[in-house]
Image: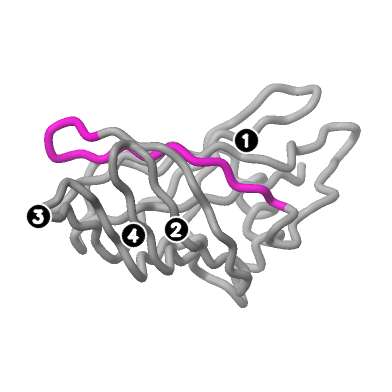
């Protein structure tokens, strides 16, 4: 089966934490699945004025886990992980529960925006990505296709 996802992490402090990046992918007419990756390099920072910023956060795409090996293989093929092994959060800022940034996937930079909340030292971000913005489209197998928009939910620690 050929399915696809994209995801981004707002950052961690160079250490692997138990929090995971999750992407919700909707399949029509078959339901949905979640995607995880544990390879994250970079950091997000809480600023004195209550805002947050991050830059050059790298998320390994070659380590994706969808729960099904064949789906992992097809996902990596569509993401061209042999040429583009990472998704990069080029820059991001947020304040008051809303944020914007620039993400680079498959060598293509696009603006993103979303929401977030803070619980203790954890930032939980929510934002949509449009697959066709990254030249990822027409993903369909035996009548089952992927929605063009995927929803990203990320929980990451924040440093001060």
For marks 2 and 1 on the same chain, the one whose residue lies earlier in the sequence: 1
Tell me how far mark 3 sits from mark 2, CA to CA: 19 Å
Can you identify the residue that label 1 sits on?
A: 25
Disc on res. 4: none
Nearer the viewer's eye, disc 1 or disc 3?
Answer: 3
Q: Determine the main secondary structure of the stretch shown in magenta.
A: strand
Q: Which type of secondary structure does the marked residue at label 1 adopt?
A: strand
Can you identify the residue that label 4 sits on?
A: 40
Residue 156 vs 47, above or below: the answer is above
- Work out whether residue 50 or residue 135 is closer to the camera in this orientation and state it: 50
Task: Please check the rendered image and state whether residue 127 is part of the magenta-colored stretch, yes or no.
Answer: yes
Colouring chosen for the image of the structure: one colour
For marks 1 and 3 on the same chain, the one whose residue lies earlier in the sequence: 1
* Residue 144, image quadrant: top right
Which residue occupies 14% across, 51% down?
49
Q: Position of residue 99 (x, y in %)?
A: 39, 47
Q: Which type of secondary structure does the marked residue at label 3 adopt?
A: loop
- Region in magenta: 118-131
Tell me how far mark 2 sits from mark 4, CA to CA: 17 Å
For marks 3 and 4 on the same chain, the one whose residue lies earlier in the sequence: 4
- Work out whether residue 37 or residue 103 is closer to the camera in this orientation and state it: 103
Q: Position of residue 9 (x, y in %)?
A: 39, 52
Which residue occupies 35% across, 65% down?
57
Which residue occupies 24% across, 55% down?
12
Can you identify the residue that label 3 sits on?
A: 160
Tell me how far mark 2 sits from mark 1, CA to CA: 21 Å
Q: Which type of secondary structure does the marked residue at label 2 adopt?
A: strand
Q: Which type of secondary structure does the marked residue at label 4 adopt?
A: strand
Disc on res. 101: 2
Residue 64 vs 118, above or below: the answer is below
């Amino acid at each position: 089966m050929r399915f696809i996802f994209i995801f981004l992490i707002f950052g961690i402090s160079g250490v692997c934490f138990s929090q995971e990046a999750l992407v919700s992918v909707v399949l029509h007419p078959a339901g949905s699945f979640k995607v995880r990756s544990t390879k994250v390099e970079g950091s997000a920072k809480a600023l004195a004025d209550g805002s947050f910023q991050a830059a050059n956060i790298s998320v390994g795409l070659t380590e994706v886990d969808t729960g099904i090996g064949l789906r992992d293989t097809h996902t990596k093929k569509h993401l061209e992980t042999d040429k583009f092994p990472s998704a990069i959060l080029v820059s991001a800022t947020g304040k008051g529960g809303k944020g914007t940034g620039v993400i680079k996937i498959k060598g293509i930079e696009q603006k993103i925006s979303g929401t977030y909340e803070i619980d203790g030292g954890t930032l939980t971000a929510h934002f949509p990505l449009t697959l066709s913005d990254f030249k990822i489209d027409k993903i369909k197998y035996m009548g089952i296709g992927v929605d063009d928009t995927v929803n990203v939910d990320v929980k990451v620690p924040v440093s001060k």
